Amino acid sequence: MQKYVGVTGFTEAAQVRRALRAVPKDPARKFMVGVLVSAKSLHNIPLKPEWQSHYPEIARIREIFPDDPRALNLVHYAPGKKHRKDTSHDLITLSDEIGSRLHGFQINAAWPREADLCVYREDCGYLRQVVVLQIGREAMELTGNQPVAVAERVNRYGGLIDGVLIDASGGTGRPFDPASARAMISQIRMRRPEIGIGIAGGISHHTVDRVRELLQEFRDLSIDAESGLRTADGSLDEEAVRLYLRRAYMALHRPGQKERRGVHVPS
């Protein structure tokens, strides 16, 4: 899977257009455009007031995602515990609603059922869209916070997933622990050398350099940022996004560098 520099939390097309100005013309890493969707926002169930502004209307997501070869457009979908049984149906619904600009999903749930992902894959195809599985705090706790157990659990998904995002913060801004991340990445890579691996947790324009040490060992590592790019009231801070993207691409981008692993991204 292609590596990327990600920003999650876009709610307007204009935000993405302005962010793209900070992305190189021919980046070695895709610019992951992340849009949040929950089962509640999909089914018009009221969200908590503090979260409402983070989730755009479903009908507007199609226009938020850019038609740009530099972009990897992912919906970050959270089914929640009450709606997990509807995961496959919801993924198919979103895929149909958003259309060709959707490149895939990040599933923000602790170890979703393989059967649900299989139903979605069989309907939408294995090559047309990508699936990234978030390994959050709950997923880690359910495996005893043991890197070997996490890696074994990831391995069970086989070709149903293309990548994982190690994110103990879950959008709260809790900084990732390099030692813990290193151990988990190593164990996953031993079992799934082809899988894409990303890291998140407290990453922003202030902290992007903390990823450098891990990149010396894992050169195809992806990064994603969310909470560190918001203002005090929870809105997306476009200046912080711009600085983060410029600093991340300066630190990570190597002109002309070829991808070691590829994934089909529809045009």
Image (spheres, grey):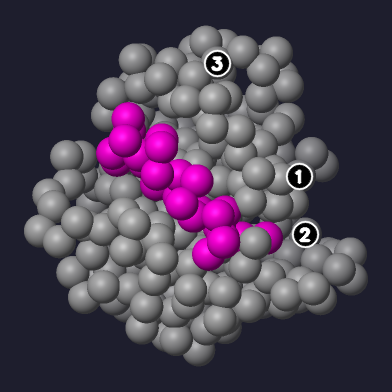
Q: Position of residue 234 (x, y in %)?
A: 76, 72
Q: How many marks?
A: 3
Three-letter amino acid code at the position of disc 3: Pro
On residue 147, the disc is: 3
Mark closest to the chain's N terminus, 2 or 3: 2
Alpha carbons under labels 1 and 3: distance apart: 24 Å
- Measuring 41% from the left and 35% from the top, which residue is drawn there? 214
Element assignment for label 2: helix
Q: Position of residue 203 (x, y in %)?
A: 57, 54
Circles 2 and 1 in contact, beta carbons < 8 Å: yes
Residues 24 and 87: in front is 24
Query: Is any atom of residue 39 visible in this view?
Result: yes
Element assignment for label 1: loop
- Measuring 28% from the left and 48% from the top, which residue is drawn there? 2
- Measuring 79% from the left and 39% from the top, which residue is drawn there? 81
Q: Estimate how packed mark 3 is, as few (under 14), some (14 to 19) or many (20 or more) residues with alpha carbons within 10 Å.
A: many
Whether 205 is among the magenta residues is yes
Mark closest to the chain's N terminus, 2 or 1: 2
Circle 2 is placed at which residue position? Answer: 40
Name the side, left or right, on which 101 lies relative to 52.
left
On residue 233, the disc is: none
Q: Position of residue 3 (x, y in %)?
A: 32, 48
- Measuring 82% from the left and 42% from the top, which residue is drawn there? 82
Name the side, left or right, on which 53 lies relative to 181.
right
Q: Which residues are magenta?
A: 203-227
The quadrant of the image that shows the C terminus is bottom left
Query: Is any atom of residue 63 visible in this view?
Result: no
Name the side, left or right, on which 30 lies relative to 210.
left
Mark closest to the chain's N terminus, 1 or 3: 1
Circle 1 is placed at which residue position? Answer: 80
Q: Position of residue 252 (x, y in %)?
A: 31, 54
